[in-house]
Image (cartoon, rainbow, N blue to C red):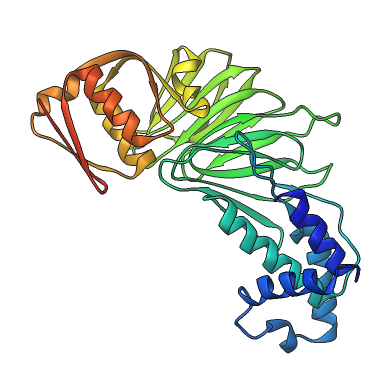
Amino acid sequence: MKPAIQDLIQKYLQGQATAEEQVLVEQYYNSFSNQRNYTETLSPRDKKLLEEKILTRILTKVQSAPETQPATLVKPIKVSLNNYLKVAAIFVGLVALAISYKYFLASDKVVLTTHFGEVATFTLPDSSRVTLNGNSVLEYTTWNKIQDREVTLQGEAFFSVKHTQNHQKFLVHVPGKMEVEVLGTEFNVLGRQHNSRVVLSSGKVQLHLPASNTSAQTVVMQPGEMVELKPQTAHVIKTKVNPEKYTSWSGRMLVLEQTSLRDLIQDLEDTYGLQVTVNDTSLLSHTFSGRLPSQDVEVLLLGLSKAFDLKITKTNNQVTIIK
């Protein structure tokens, strides 16, 4: 949110806004407040509890920037519950207009979401940073200085985790697939339906994997290693890789190293929401090495067309590849 907007809202709450500024804020709020205020049905005790939660959790600073979208809590301002609900509604409306990813706060839970083809970077409460690839969701319940830092991921994300003075663990849960435990490091996590993997760029992580036969598996990773879990077979594969190949998407670039067309098509479907048809399945085994910009799907498809010497057409979200 731009500082000018924040200043206007604060002036309104503090009773310092001009008549014209009050009209602007109230008109904006009214466009997002067509339903009856549900707090009218709450008991005084419940209303007080709700106010305390809002004061400590809901007001969130979300600033748009070319490379980062912080999602950190800021110091609350003392205002009445009704005014605070107005501010919350205004903030939600402004964010919806200003940025294309979704940001929700429900009680203590934070949900960060990217749409197909989007990449967004967020700053977490501990100053760690996470970049979400397209079609990804990161959830966490706000933690304090003595709790483990836990997040749940669906999709793909690159983490740059801050080490804390009291050595808090940072845990990434990929539901039904794995748990990544770190203290301070940089790593990439993929948790899609067809595949799950962790690539470590720096530091050290420990993976807790689903039980195999009678016991759960724990795998310790070193920089430059990838651990891949195939959901269909539950096989765990650990290999040495070039981390850039798996993390370059966070910089809006794809680094390809003998990458097959089959793998790229899977990425187009998972990350960009495309439905891809290939007229000749023998093309799927073709590979390419190089770099392709990935921020714009149209540019990416053009690059793939030239790289593989194929004709690629796109109509809405339908893509056809022919020789």
Query: Does 294 appear above or below 147?
Result: above
Percent position of residue 81, x then y: 82, 75
Between 202 and 55, the residue placed more toward the observer is 55
Q: In the displayed image of the protein, which residue is found farthest to the front? A: 20
Query: x and y percent of residue 3 in the render?
Result: 77, 49
Residue 268 in view: yes
Left or right: where 51 falls relative to 252: right
| Residue 9, quarter of the rendered image | bottom right
**Count of labels in the image:** 0
- Which quadrant of the structure image shows residue 6? bottom right
Image-based side of 234 in relation to 170, left or right: left
Please report the residue visible at 69 percent of the width from the left and 46 percent of the height from the top: 63
Give coordinates of residue 217: x percent, y percent.
51, 29
Query: Is residue 103 at least partly visible in the picture?
Result: no
Q: Is residue 255 left or right of residue 120?
A: left
Q: Residue at x 27, y 24 (%)?
A: 304
Residue at the (66%, 23%) spot, across then down: 185
Left/right of residue 80 with respect to residue 237 in the rendered view: right
Q: Is residue 170 above or below residue 28?
A: above
